[in-house]
Every structure is written in structure tokens, then in C-alpha cells.
Amino acid sequence: MKAIGGYFEWEEPQQGKEWHSKALRLNSGRNALEYLLRTGKFKSIFLPDYCCDVLSKKAEHLNVRIIKYEVNERMEIAGTIQTPGDKSLFLAVNYFGLKNEYIAGLKAKFQHLVVDNVQAFFAEHINGTSSFNSARKFFGVPDGAYLYPFNDPDLYLEEDDSSARIQHLFDRLEKSPEAGYEKYLANEQLMGNIPLRKMSAITSGILQSLDYNRIIKKRRENYQFLHENIGQQNEFSASLPVNAVPMAYPFLSIRKGIREKMIKDRIFIPVLWPELRTNAAEKSQAYRFAEYLLPLPIDHRLNISDMDRIIKLIA
């Protein structure tokens, strides 16, 4: 039985053109944030309560003060927040790649707006802001992120060497996701500690050769098919905006056992930010999303038949 979801296998080179050719090529999204904090000499950063704790850890490591703000049921800013100072970054997450229009409206409100496009690789950069993404969330590569900094690059960086972090990609390609899973976990641990460097030559070569238009079409088709069939059962408003290219389909439900049923059917769903189940306030939207939201796979490896398998386990 075909496995659905989970980490990516090695991405076979195709005939394509680099999507973010004008951006700075770095080795990870979290290191892109470090680059911004170091080069901008920012003293504080506003972070949403619903986000990965690696962002907080990066800020803490650089002695940058963290100010948390809450998100609402639409994954947007809840209520009003204090105006950030001249040396403050305001970070907004483009959740699942669905918040392009909303985030564009934030530009006028914040002097130093940085957009976390880790879940929105294809999102267009907004002039006057900074933004970064993560290639590993969308493709079978060992590292990689693109950063649009506020100013021209002025920090010397060495090129990353990812040759020791690729075996899990080949194991999934030639064997199975289960065969390379332990290596994948080990690689995730390594990625949490790699220093800020340029994107590796391996990743850069792959990202300059993918058929991005085909990938976009697949992702949107799969997402829309899921929404048309299980959208009424979804407690999160997940309509697909025009031109959005989503990372996954965010299915929110308090029903128990869905994830377990899917694992038995070799459908692998990531657990987003499990630390929030402990760290977030129990009545917050961040806790609700961390506890009950299932990011259903819709990536370019999959087709409508695969989506049907997912639907049958939910309907």
C-alpha cells in the first residue's frame, strides 16, 4: 500500500527554473531569522503564541527580548497589541500558505514586518518587508531557505555541506518512509543546531531544476478536492484563496482517533508544534490548534486517488 505524507524522498531533478532567484540562499528558515536579528541589531521581537519554539530559542540565544501576541480562530492577530519600537521586529506567520492577503495588509501597521513563509514557499515577497521560507517543508532536499532581507546582504557566510544529511531522502526513495524514519529524526536534530551558512550546493542545484508549475497545480488540486469533500466537517475556515499554494490542508476537529486510523493506513500526518500542548494557555486558540488540528498531506507526490483514501477515513 502506498504511503501518503510524512517526510519527503530525494527530489529528482527536472527541467525548471529557480522560484526565488533574487533571494539570499541560506541553509534553514530558523537561521534566516538569526540573519535578520544579527544584521538588523534588533532588541526585541513580537512572536505569535501559535508558532514553532525554535523561533523563540533563536531570539533567546541572541539575547533578543520576546513579546508574545495571541492569534484568533482565523490565525490572525487577536485584539490590539502595543506598537513595536524602532528596534523591534514583528513576525507574522503565513499559516499553511493561506494568509497572503491578510499579511499584505499588515505592512502599513508595522515598521519592521518579517513574514514567516515556512508554510508558504511560493508566497510572493512583499516590498518593504522581510520574509523567509523553508525548502524542506515542500521538497526532498537536505537543507535550504530563501531570505529577502531588509537591506542588501552584508554578512560573510560559508557554504553549508549537507552530504552527511541526505541518507534518509534516499532511503525513502528506494525503500520506504519507515526505512529512513530514524535517520530523518536524527537529521531533524542536526538541523536544529547547524550554524548559519549559505544553502548547500546539493540543495541549490535541486531547487534550480524543479518543475514548479506542476508542483503548484498538484498542490492546489489536491487541496481543493479535500476541501470540497470534507470542508463542511472542518472547524477551521480553510477555503483556498486565489494564487495561494498551501503546505497542507488544515483540518480542525475534536473527533478522536483520526490520526491513529490514518497511521494504520500508512497516511502520515505531522504533529505541528507539540510543545504548545504544554506551553500554551489551555483556553487559547494556540492550544486548540496544537491539540486538534491535522495538517493533511496534499503535496505534489499525491493524486486524487490518494485524497480519496484520506477522505474515506474522515467521512
Image (cartoon, grey):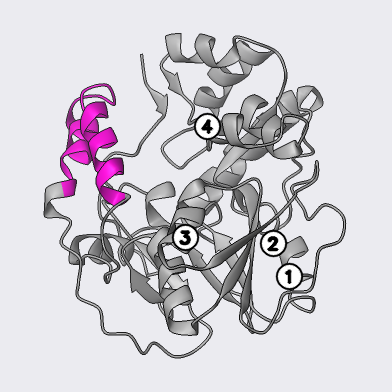
Q: Quadrant of residue 153?
A: bottom left
Q: CA distance from mark 2 to mark 3?
A: 28 Å
Image quarter of the C terminus: top right
Q: Evaluate if marks 1 and 2 touch, with contact meaning CB atoms under 8 Å apart.
A: yes
Q: Amino acid at mark 2?
A: Asn
Q: CA distance from mark 1 to mark 3?
A: 28 Å
Which residue: 66% across, 25% down? 292
Q: Amino acid at mark 1?
A: Ala
Task: State the residue in front, 230 or 182.
Answer: 182
Q: Amino acid at mark 4?
A: Pro
Residue underneath mark 4? 274
Which residue: 74% across, 47% down? 75
State the mark number for residue 104. 1
Instruction: Name which of mark 2 and mark 3 comes first in the sequence.
Output: 3
Report the span colored magenta: 165-191
State the mark number for residue 100. 2
Instruction: Name which of mark 4 and mark 2 comes first in the sequence.
Output: 2
Assess disc 2: are there few (<14), some (14-19) or many (≥20) residues with their C-alpha within 10 Å of its C-alpha: many
Query: Does dot 1 land on a helix, a strand or a loop?
Result: helix
State the mark number for residue 60. 3
Assess disc 4: are there few (<14), some (14-19) or many (≥20) residues with their C-alpha within 10 Å of its C-alpha: some
* Residue 170 is covered by the magenta coloring: yes
Q: CA distance from mark 4 to mark 2?
A: 25 Å
Q: Quadrant of residue 112?
A: bottom right
Assess disc 1: are there few (<14), some (14-19) or many (≥20) residues with their C-alpha within 10 Å of its C-alpha: some
State the mark number for residue 124. none
Instruction: Give the overall secondary structure of the magenta segment.
Output: helix
Query: Does dot 4 land on a helix, a strand or a loop?
Result: loop
